[in-house]
Image: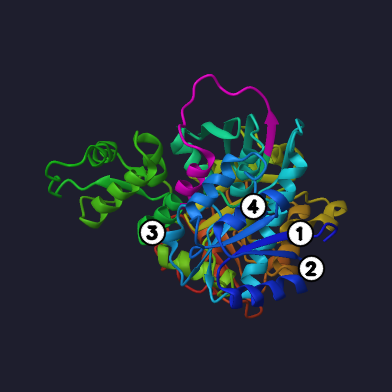
Amino acid sequence: MPNTRKILIADPDLATVRSLARGLRQQGYQVAHAQDGSRALELSVLRHPEVILFDEDCPLIDARRFVQILQANPRTADIPVVLTMRGADPDRARAFREGFLAKPFNLDEVLARIDHLCRRVEAARELKGDAREIEGGLGQLPLADLLQILSMNRRTGRLVLGNGAERGEIHLSQGSPVNAHTGEAEGEKALFRLIAWKEGTFAFAPGDAPLKKRIQRSMEDALLEGARQADERARLLDGAPALTQRLSVQPEAPAPVDPHPVTLAVLEALQQPRSLLELLDVVDAPDLEILSAARSLFERGVVAVSTAPGSGPEVLLTPAEVHALRGRLLHGRPTRSALVVKVVVCGSTARAGRAVLKGLPGLVAVATEPGCLRSGFGTLGRLEVSDALKLDFVMLPTAEAARPLWRPFTSQALGALVADSAPATTRLARFLAFELKVPISLLVGPGLAEGDQLPAELRGAPAGASLVERDVAGAVRTLLLAALRPVLGEAHGTVVRPDATADPLTPFGGAR
């Protein structure tokens, strides 16, 4: 650390302070101690520490009042305060933006939290008074941290966010959110959706605030509420239909007696089949209320997954299959965020990408005319299989000169769709099948690949290869199911026809 980071521990328990201070000093931190809230306030003003650990048992000034006083002073308003307490009680710490640390302390957890906060404070100081644009990735600087930095520096302007095919904007005035947009949503509805994003890109441009203020919350309040809503959303979606599955009212089901206005609006919207994603945009109500009403109606049998022909995108995987695939791809590692994997679209012309866009309902293109259709290189669009699994469809140049790009740009590839029979396309497909060992589906039909047999170059692919007639969604489902099975060695080809009635779980490597 080029500059020694200063940590203030406010805690009357001297034994705990000595043990923690020793561990922090061994890591190069400068540590100060206060036994009560009054002394902690004095040291905060005099020494301006990077982080304060404030125990809930501190006398004279309690934790909540201490934070209020710091935030009211421009010199100390940007100092993060972490509450420390005996045991883990998130409800007691809910009002504290930086959360809590439970005693007895885990030193690794304390060090990780302090390092994270120090990096954020340092980033905020670098931006202080800086009017230039800033941009980066949410993987390096989480959105909640970025918004706190912009808030602490009282920045005014527009924050533009990108997450695959999705786009969003948050407008700030003096560090407070005043409006937000994503998709069809605006105001708080959009803001809380965006706060939940864990990946993507950002770009902040200083500028004038919009004249009309649609959000009436402070940044701190918005972030706390956004975190609460993200947890509640995850709970409501657990066991519910996938976000892309179409739902409709069941004619024989009894109508609810004196329904809540949001429930009534959901019932009216589902008179025609709609997915949960569409429902969230169509119904004029907070997302959590819509999800709660829809889940209640689903559990009571008032609405169900629509089976009407043409009622919406094919269900590519059941919830159980999504769970199994995530477990296999993550190798059992737990994660609360959505898993994003790639499907490579192999084709020598733009026709391949257009065929996938046209033939796969639910695939959202990154733009009206994705750049990869012209260049043959880039992201085509994103398909949300479920709230927990998303597929990015990407295109790669097939020319031999582009071979050095193939491996680095196909990391996290789950499989490949082969959309023509050109030799260059087959070379790329063979690389994916035999070197990356991912399953391959060859799309056959007018304007696509030709023939009724797999090319000799793709036979015996370790993860399997299939021949699918015209059905893009069926080809993608075949790839997803293949990814559920271990790579055992050479496999034979499979033919999948649109009117096939065979069990879709027939082994991917089974005989034609």
Three-letter amino acid code at the position of disc 2: Gly
Q: Nearer the viewer, residue 116 or 296?
A: 116
Instruction: Work out how far the residue at label 1 is from the one at label 4, CA to CA, in angstroms.
Output: 18 Å
Three-letter amino acid code at the position of disc 3: Arg
Three-letter amino acid code at the position of disc 1: Arg
In the picture, the quarter occupied by the N terminus is bottom right
Residue 40 is situated, as x and y percent measured from the top left of the image, at: 61, 57
Side (left or right) of 90 relative to 45: left
Which residue is situated farthest in the bottom direction here?
488
Find disc 1 in the rendering and name its residue. 5
Find disc 2 in the rendering and name its residue. 28
Side (left or right) of 237 relative to 340: left
Find disc 3 in the rendering and name its residue. 235
Q: Earlier in the sequence, mark 1 or mark 3?
A: 1
Q: Earlier in the sequence, mark 1 or mark 4?
A: 1
Residue 363 is situated, as x and y percent measured from the top left of the image, at: 53, 45
Q: Earlier in the sequence, mark 3 or mark 2?
A: 2
How would you rate the neighbour count of disc 2 (Cα within 10 Å): few for under 14, some for 14-19, many for 20 or more? Answer: few
Q: Earlier in the sequence, mark 2 or mark 1?
A: 1
Q: Nearer the viewer, residue 216 or 9?
A: 9
Residue 7 sits in quarter = bottom right
State whether residue 324 is above or below residue 287. Answer: below
Q: Earlier in the sequence, mark 3 or mark 4?
A: 4
